[in-house]
Image (cartoon, coloured by chain):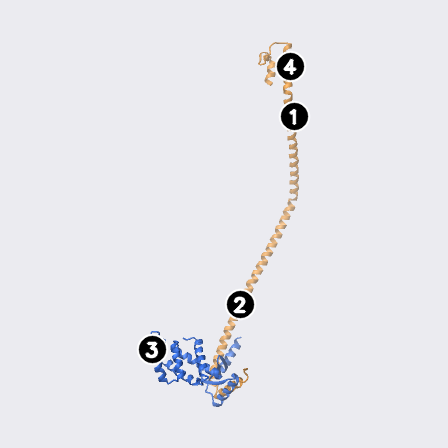
Amino acid sequence: MGDLLLDIMSGGWMGGPLGLVGSGLPRVVNFLIFVAALYYVLRKPVSDFFRQRAQAIARELEAAARARDVAAQELAQMRARMGRLEEEIAAIRARAEREAEAEYERLQREAQAEAEKIRALAEREIEMARRAAELELKTFLVERVLARARVLLRQQVTEEDHRRLIAQFIEELAEVPR
Amino acid sequence: MIPTRIARRYARALAEYTFPRQEHEVVNQELRALAEIFRETPLLGEVFANPVIPRAQKERLLQTLIERAGVGRTTATFLHLLLKNYRVQHLEAIARAFAEEVDRRLGIVNVEVRTARPLQDDERQHLHRRLERLTGKTVRLREVVDERLLGGVQARVDSEVYDGSLDARLEALRRQLLL
């Protein structure tokens, strides 16, 4: 359309593609008619175009406004979080310290329990070894003493002792229940 | 080896036959004598146990044995019965079981008495009386002088042992000390 207007202003339109020829008033009238026709034909699409365009711009403006609001909110939140960061760091540190303390205590309890078990086991083993050694020593001593006693008895039991032992056995038989 | 149960069965059957006829003592003695012969001559048992040797030969051998031992009619018949049932080779066990059965029926109990020194007469009589009072049966004493004993007496009545030896006292002391 710009080219056409230039062409009109330069006067080249009279032999142009519209086939409008002549000069003076008719040409002006023709031009007005053409303009009117053009306006009639293009009014609606152009109007729609500009309205849509205006609406799109309005939507873009609204979206931009919303984005700005969101950004502002995020910025505010960020600032607020930045403000609470120290507090959060302190809370995280405190929680970590509490957990570390609890873990340390748990490990300590487990280690103590394990140590107690090992100690009890060791004590039992020591006690068993002590008893075994005691029994072994006792058995050795008893066997030695009895072996010596047998030797002495064999040497020292007299005929009179034999007779007394036999008599004693016969007496004891009387006390045996039938 | 014949099971004790089978030997006892023959012994009971023979006792059932001999006791009413008052032959148990004689038969007991004859069986003991024959068992002694079998003990001294192991070949006899082997011959009677050998299934290859014909029964007629075993019969002749048994008859010779009966004649030489001079056993009575009841014992001879019993021996023939054992031959018929292939049990002659177990005569020792059967004779032992019969002796026990006779003792049981007569109320006699065998007591083995072990002492370090031989019993004196009065001790023997006293002990005999005590044992008879204890068991409530007639006691047949078998005395064994065991020099391994330190002193005292051990008396075995069937499966029961009454131990009055010094050895037993030392053993009791040993157990007490080791508790």
| Left or right for B124, reference A72 | left
Tag 2, which chain?
Answer: A
Which residue, given by chain and number where applicable, does mark 4 sit on? A33
Please state, as top left, top right, bottom left or bottom right, where the N terminus of chain B lies in the image: bottom left
Tag 4, which chain?
Answer: A
- Which numbered marker is on residue B56? 3
| C-alpha gap between disc 4 and disc 3 | 167 Å
- Check disc 3: other Cα within 10 Å, few if <14, some if 14-19, many if 20+: few
| C-alpha gap between disc 2 and disc 1 | 102 Å
Tell me which amino acid carries mark 1: Arg
Q: Residue at x 64, y 16 (%)?
A: A37
- Which numbered marker is on residue A51? 1
The answer to which of A127 and B118 lies nearer the viewer is B118
- Check disc 2: other Cα within 10 Å, few if <14, some if 14-19, many if 20+: few
| C-alpha gap between disc 1 and disc 3 | 148 Å
Of all chains in the rendering, the one displayed in orange is: A
Q: Earlier in the sequence, mark 2 or mark 1?
A: 1
4 or 2: mark nearer the eye:
4
Of all chains in the rendering, the one displayed in blue is: B
| C-alpha gap between disc 4 and disc 2 | 127 Å
Farthest residue toward the bottom? B122
Disc 2 to disc 1: CB gap under 8 Å: no
Identify the element where label 2 is drawn.
Answer: helix
Which residue, given by chain and number where applicable, does mark 2 sit on? A126
